Image (tube, helix red, strand yellow):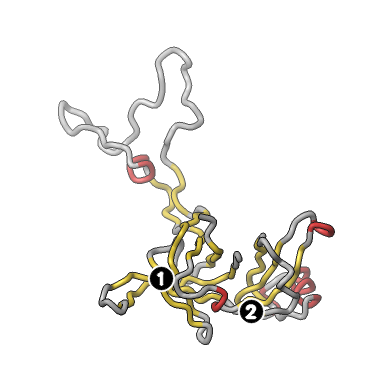
Amino acid sequence: MKQAILGKKIGMTQVFCEDGTMVPVTVVMAGPCPVTQIKTVDHDGYDAVQMAFMPVREKLITKPQMGHLKKAGVEAHRYVKEFRLDDCSQYEVGNVIKADVFEKGSHVDVTGISKGKGFEGNIKRWNQARGRKTHGSHSYRVAGSLGACTYPGEVFKTKHLPGHMGRERITVQNLEVVRSDAERNLLLIKGAIPGANGGLVLVRSTIK
């Protein structure tokens, strides 16, 4: 059965398995996430579970958001997200989802916002080659020819050019849960996940 939870990226560390091998893991503070709404096909057109994460003061969220949470009997939370799951009948408004929804050895897909790099050139952004440093050339790290000559006489929209890099929604699939600690609301996931420390991540059962 597919499961999902919201979490916050803490950082990376390493753990040692029983056979002595070292495994790099990312520590995620997963939950607790109270359920704020259950969406159904009859009422909303699709099945989904809406949950909240990270308690905050009421003055830090909008009044419509606070009214929605109070209707569900939930205190103020910073994030409210929903997940489309196969079976939403097992959830009820007010239930609290914890890190133990994922057991050791289960595989998950983790979604987050990558680190922002600002404005970057075509070499760093698209891994293009630099210009030559011989025969009087002074074009070392700039874009070269961008298009054809007379026809069509324009630069195509799909051309790789310098611009904003990073801060994109990225999903890393099929990562293994090395350890699950429901008491401390921690998930240790093998490998790296997108985003900076402290960023919001969505952990779902893998689709592969």
Report helix, strand or loop for mark 1: strand
Quarter of the figure with residue 49: bottom right
**Residue 128: x %, y % from top left:** 32, 38
Q: Disc number at residue 38?
A: none
Amino acid residing under circle 2: Val
Read off the residue under disc 1: 26
- Residue 137 is left or right of residue 205, and the answer is left
Q: Is residue 45 above or below residue 69?
A: above
Q: Is residue 47 above or below residue 20?
A: above
- Earlier along the polypeptide chain: callout 1 or callout 2? 1
Quarter of the figure with residue 130: top left
The number of numbered badges drawn on the structure is 2
**Residue 120: x %, y % from top left:** 39, 46
Of marks 1 and 2, the one in the foreground: 1
Residue at x 52% of width, y 60% of height: 206
Q: Residues within 10 Å of mark 2 (few under 14, many from 20)?
A: few
Amino acid residing under circle 1: Thr
Q: Is residue 126 above or below residue 16?
A: above
Residue at x 56% of width, y 64% of height: 204
Q: Quadrant of the N terminus?
A: bottom right
Outermost residue, top direction?
150
**Residue 197: x %, y % from top left:** 44, 70
Real-space Cα separation, disc 1 to disc 2, in angstroms: 25 Å
**Residue 18: x %, y % from top left:** 30, 79
- Residue 58 is left or right of residue 3, and the answer is right
- Residue 62 is left or right of residue 183, and the answer is right
Read off the residue under disc 2: 56
Residue at x 37% of width, y 42% of height: 121
Outermost residue, left direction?
134
